[in-house]
Amino acid sequence: MLAISRFPDEVKSDFREAFDVTFIDVMPTGGPNAALGAREVLLLSFGSELRTAVIGALPASLKAIATYSVGYEHIDIAAARARGLTVLNTPGVLTDAVAEIGLLLMLGAARRATESIDLIRSRHWPGWNPTQLIGVELLGKNLGILGMGRIGRGIARRARAFGMTIHYHNRSRAAPGLEDNAIYHARFPDMAATTDVLMIAAQLSAETRHYLDAGRVAMLKRGTIVCNVARGDLIDDDALIAALQNGHVRAAGLDVFENEPTIDPRYYDLPNVFMLPHIGSSTIETRRRMAQALIIGLETLRAGGKPANRVV
Ligand code: DGY
């Protein structure tokens, strides 16, 4: 196996126990082929792109691509399928870590964490007074979740404990056992009309790119908080930034951005943006579970079985 990415030491040990593996930190400029040689598995992650031309030129000995991520938009899946390659990812094992970050984003945005941290770290905090950094509570608010998959449901479960009422919009209604009293809206505008906090937890696709555009931002109630744990490209930055500047959107909690790490620089100057550098899945527990998911999938494949985490 050739593994391209920086992995925690524990994760490297997990992979080494299961496979004969060579690690390199970054994708070579000319593509992976020279380093791959006759290896059968290419392991990489979000940030290492495998587009059509590169996939077409991969050596015939390669059997599988394993992405150390749940998202796989960095791989041209149609090209991998055409080339007869199996692609594995890590669904399910990131749910709790990302859902916890979802709660952090909501709290950080609602309670003005950016301004608070800046104030105390500036060493110019004048001391407590009743007008200081007044935010809003989550208690009693409506949470509108865009994309009620595993992560959306994980956020819903935790948000209920904060006293929030859960609404959601999906292409289709969740199975009754998975809905857990969340209120389904078949149309985004209906959910937007009731939402105090919008949580984006949807998958990125050609259809959902820039889903939260100026038209949909206008459908939100004035003062809505917008959070994103999924992918930055789901948001049209121009639309969100304008609404954060004019107060239509009260605050945003963002863990993901379009064009990471070269994010729209206007975000840095907005005190009502609580932002994190894509750390949703960054816990050691999750990192090791991601490795285990790929190890199990690859071993299943090697034994001639059908891995549960097979994308194609
Ligand atoms: C994932 O697994 O998709 C995480 O967002 C890291 O890319």
Image (cartoon, rainbow, N blue to C red):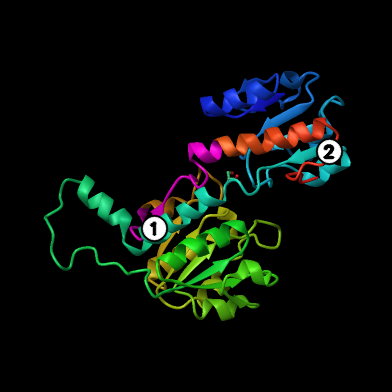
The residue pinned by badge 2 equals: 305
SS class of the residue under badge 2?
A: loop
Taking depth in this image into account, of 114 and 296 the one nearest to the observer is 296
Taking depth in this image into account, of 200 and 9 the one nearest to the observer is 9
Residue kind at label 1, given as amino acid type: Val
| Labelled disc at residue 260 | none
Give the vertical position of 169 relative to 21 (above or below). Answer: below
Q: Residue 233, image x and y in percent?
A: 59, 55
Q: Is residue 118 magenta?
A: no
Q: Residue 157, image x and y in percent?
A: 50, 63
The residue at the point 80 percent across, 34 percent down is: 301
Give the vertical position of 37 relative to 283 (above or below). Answer: above
Give the vertical position of 116 relative to 47 (above or below). Answer: below
Looking at the image, residue 51 sits to the left or right of residue 303; the answer is: left
Looking at the image, residue 4 sits to the left or right of residue 103; the answer is: right
Q: Residue 78, image x and y in percent?
A: 82, 46
Taking depth in this image into account, of 242 and 113 the one nearest to the observer is 113
Q: Which quadrant of the figure shows ligand 1?
A: top right
Q: Quadrant of the C terminus?
A: top right
Q: Which residues are magenta?
A: 269-287
Task: Say whether mark 2 is within 8 Å of ligand 1.
Answer: no
The residue at the point 35 percent across, 61 percent down is: 272
Q: Earlier in the sequence, mark 1 or mark 2?
A: 1
Circle 2 Cα neighbour tier, 10 Å, few/some/many (<14 / 14–19 / ≥20): few
The residue pinned by badge 1 equals: 273
Residue kind at label 2, given as amino acid type: Gly
